[in-house]
Image (cartoon, grey):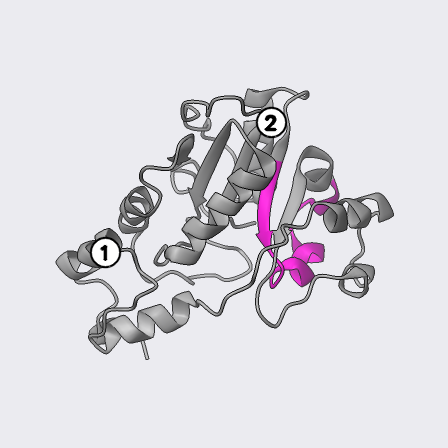
């Protein structure tokens, strides 16, 4: 998810998974969505048991302007393919339909208003972006409204030393450590996937349906400037 502005209401939530409670949110550029994204959602479902999971592709990340190569419509369509068949999981255009840039806090406030205060709201976040948390818009308010669930990325350890460098409250540091998603990090990189596609390769990290979409729509070709 990006750091983004709220004037759109969130999409209706997906049907609830049996026995689940609360909402888990995974945001990002999804440029393109790949197998690690799906594995992450499956791991979060197994650990958190949410009633629903919302996949939220960003429009423009204020910390990484003009960072996406595929269009918003293409990224939404690829996410629909990548997460198809997972119970209680839906793809939301909430951020894409807003005026960019749009802040995560606005998305969270809209979803929290929909959920109410008693329902859990989890926000998935990679350990590689955790050092940027001090730069997130209204980060202190954000951490009061969600439980941040950090998943590991290679080369970006999550430990108390990393958190001690952040200017966030002690209770939030303790909460982040306590709720870390302990899964094996992998080396899958969207940048590497795009580069492979530009060379005409078929990366194994892409689901066949997503790869077929990429091919049929001519995405990430060498002419698009991917090195």
> Residue 23, image x and y in percent?
55, 31
Badge 2, how many Cα within 10 Å: few under 14, some, many 20+?
Answer: some
> Residue 183, image x and y in percent?
58, 56
Name the secondary structure under disc 2.
Answer: helix
Report the residue marked by disc 2. 112
Badge 1, how many Cα within 10 Å: few under 14, some, many 20+?
Answer: some
Query: What stretch of residues is rendered in magenta?
Result: 122-140
Tell me the residue at 51%/48% (across/down). 1
Tell me the residue at 56%/61% (across/down). 184
> Residue 14, image x and y in percent?
41, 26
- Gap between marks 2 and 1 measured at Cα: 35 Å
Q: Quadrant of the C terminus?
A: bottom left
Q: Nearer the viewer, residue 159 or 135?
A: 159
Mark 2 or 1: the one toward you: 1
User: Do we see residue 5 in this rendering?
Assistant: no
Q: Is residue 65 above or below residue 27?
A: below
User: Do we see residue 76 in this rendering?
Assistant: yes
Tell me the residue at 67%/21% (across/down). 117
Q: Nearer the viewer, residue 117 or 207?
A: 207
Tell me the residue at 57%/46% (across/down). 124
Q: Within the magenta stretch, is there residue 135?
A: yes
Q: Which mark is residue 13?
A: none
Report the residue marked by disc 1. 208
Name the secondary structure under disc 1.
Answer: helix
Q: Within the magenta stretch, is there residue 75?
A: no
Image quadrant assignment for residue 20:
top right
Q: Is residue 162 above or below residue 45?
A: below
Q: Say left or right for 69 vs 6.
A: left
């Amino acid at each position: 998810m990006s750091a983004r502005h709220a004037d759109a209401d969130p999409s209706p939530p997906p049907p609830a998974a049996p026995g689940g409670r609360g909402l888990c949110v995974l945001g990002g550029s999804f440029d393109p969505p790949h197998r690690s994204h799906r594995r992450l959602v499956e791991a979060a479902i197994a650990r958190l048991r949410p009633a629903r999971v919302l996949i939220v592709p960003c429009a423009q990340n204020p910390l990484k302007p003009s960072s996406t190569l595929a269009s918003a419509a293409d990224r939404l369509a690829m996410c629909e393919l990548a997460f198809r068949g997972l119970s209680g999981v839906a793809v939301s255009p909430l951020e894409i339909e807003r005026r960019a840039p749009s802040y995560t806090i606005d998305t969270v406030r809209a979803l929290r208003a929909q959920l109410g205060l008693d329902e859990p709201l989890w926000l998935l976040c990679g350990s590689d972006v955790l050092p940027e948390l001090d730069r997130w818009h209204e980060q202190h308010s954000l951490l009061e409204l969600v439980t941040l669930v950090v998943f590991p990325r290679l080369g970006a350890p999550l430990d108390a030393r990393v958190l001690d460098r952040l200017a966030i409250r002690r209770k939030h540091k303790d909460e982040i450590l306590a709720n870390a998603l302990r899964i094996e990090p992998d080396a899958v990189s969207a940048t590497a996937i795009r580069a492979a596609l530009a060379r005409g390769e078929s990366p194994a990290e892409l689901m066949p349906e997503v790869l077929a979409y990429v091919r049929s729509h001519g995405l990430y070709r060498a002419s698009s400037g991917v090195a």
